[in-house]
Amino acid sequence: MLHRVCVALLLFCVTAVAVGAPGDAELRGVNALRAAAGLAALRTEPRLADAARRHAAYLDRHREPGKTVQGVSAHAQQPGRAGFVAATPAERALAAGYPHREVLENVSMGYASADAALDGLMSAIYHRLTFLDLLADELGVAVGERSRVFLLGRGDRSAMCNTTPPEAMLQSPLDCLGTPMRRDYYARLCAALPRHARFRPAHAISCPDGTRLDAAYMQAVCGDPPPAARFSGRGRYVTPCGNARRLDADWFLGLCSGREPAALAAGDGSYYMICDDRERVDAAWFETLCRDLPPAAQFSGTLRYRRPCSQPLDVRVDYLDAQDAARLEGTPEVVVWPPDDARDVPPAFFVEEPDPLPDRDVSGYPLSLQFNPGRVERVELRGFRLYRDEDDAADVTVATRLLDASSDPNRILTAFEFALFPLERLAWGQSYRAVADLSIDGRPRRMAWRFRTREPGAPLLVAGRDTQAFVVQSGADYWLYLPPTGQAAQTAQSVRTQHRQGNRVTIEAVDANTLSIRLDARHCDRVRMRFDSGREVDLIPRGCPG
């Protein structure tokens, strides 16, 4: 089932993208991420894209990037507000003509490019698991003025809803004398009821010894007795026809003794009314049928059902589960992120809605293990560690926090999903090694892999003190990194500069702790940068006195 919905919000200002961008870069980016994880690509779905477009327009109208609305999810629309389509992602998909409601939605706001948006979404664990969903195979993307909406769906569910096979529909069983019987088997039985199964009533008058005679046989005898049955006028006679007609007694007693098997009534006179009470069948025949009901006729499913389709169809849960199992069979046993030997991994995680780390404003990029429930029945994580690779020293253990189904504060992770959060943001351009010790279906297994965080896009200046000065080359680009502290987690969100007229400083946000800066100095005078976090950084043009 597809249930996970979440939103990422950018925490610093960027230039907005143009309205109506087609989303091709986003689609390519998502599929590149899935390919790196070993998953199949998502194909574009126009109806999902239409639903995403309408929601992006709604978000652009009513929400600001970096701001949350208390108690109102970015996935929810409120009736009566301009641009309202439907309250939930599922309802918006149905409104766009998508044939079922099993969809996933990711939302991001405030990012200038597809790459930046996907970086932010993949650093947010719930968003990541949405993009790496094992069941989804369709995607609709919309890019608005400030928002991006991704809506994932399933083509196999669409095909089922468009043409629902009979075996998918819930059919309550029939009670065949205590044995549950399939309704389709019962329908076929009634359409071709065996002749010998039909109940044949007994004649009203029985033999002297109590033997019952077939009513139809006796009706024929009484209407036109065979010559041997006619009373000749001598000897004994009987009147079993219920009228004045006399039959030879010896002939009749021979009939009662079984001389003519067709004359004897079948069974004990009991019958069942079946086939909507239109047919009477012999009780013994029906009891034998129910006792020896073939496996194909026995009801083996459950009475559980869901209604995933736009039309009100009761679809069997075990049929949907079998459809899930068929899809999962072709996917990897485990999806690891970041993948082994990954490069260019962002070093930090800032915010997600809902928040997996509500007590922290910044942490390191999370690692995740996602096991395939179609190929694995039980996973126990016995250890999950992250090390900082050092060239000339022993690896340094990184302090982390593990989230799983029991420790996830939002109860979104399943028993097959695990996330490891470094408690501090990772370093730029640094190699790391992850090790996980597990028991998978009772078998021990160790997984180990490496990845490297993103290299700075320019020489890196690390401002780790409250006041710091750097000598820089005029006209050259630098990255200025202000490590977070306990007092200020998002250290580079707001900055004011003080410099002599004629000097110019160009500043762009990289993340909430890092800026891309460029000093164009016409005068030999320092530039002072003051941050809301309380830090001060001076930039001194190279060749000028400090």
Image (tube, rainbow, N blue to C red):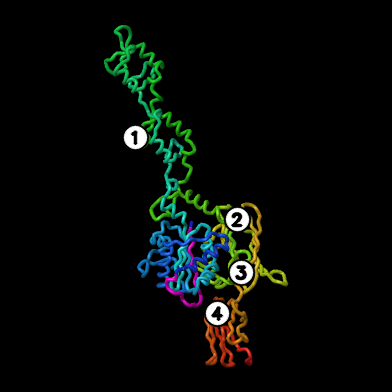
| Disc 3, SS | strand
Label for residue 492? 4
Q: What residue type is disc 4 on? A: Ala
Q: Earlier in the sequence, mark 4 or mark 1?
A: 1
Which quarter of the figure has residue 194? top left
Residue ID for mark 3: 343
In the rendered view, tell whether residue 203 sits above or below residue 46: above
Q: Looking at this view, is 412 or 20 the one in front?
A: 20
Q: Looking at this view, is 343 or 62 the one in front?
A: 343
Q: Earlier in the sequence, mark 1 or mark 3?
A: 1
Residue 32 in percent (x, y) is at 54, 65
Q: CA distance from mark 2 to mark 1?
A: 55 Å
Dot 1 crowding, Cα within 10 Å, few <14, some 14–19, many 20+? few
Q: CA distance from mark 1 to mark 3?
A: 74 Å
Magenta range is: 2-21
Q: CA distance from mark 4 to mark 2?
A: 41 Å
Residue ID for mark 1: 278
Residue ID for mark 2: 379
In the rendered view, tell whether residue 421 sits above or below residue 493: above
Q: Which SS type dominates the magenta stretch? A: loop
| Disc 4, SS | loop
Dot 4 crowding, Cα within 10 Å, few <14, some 14–19, many 20+? many
Q: Earlier in the sequence, mark 4 or mark 2?
A: 2
Q: Looking at the image, is mark 3 or mark 2 nearer the viewer?
A: 3
Quadrant showing the C terminus = bottom right
Give yes or no for contact between labels 3 and 2 (Cβ–Cβ under 8 Å). Answer: no
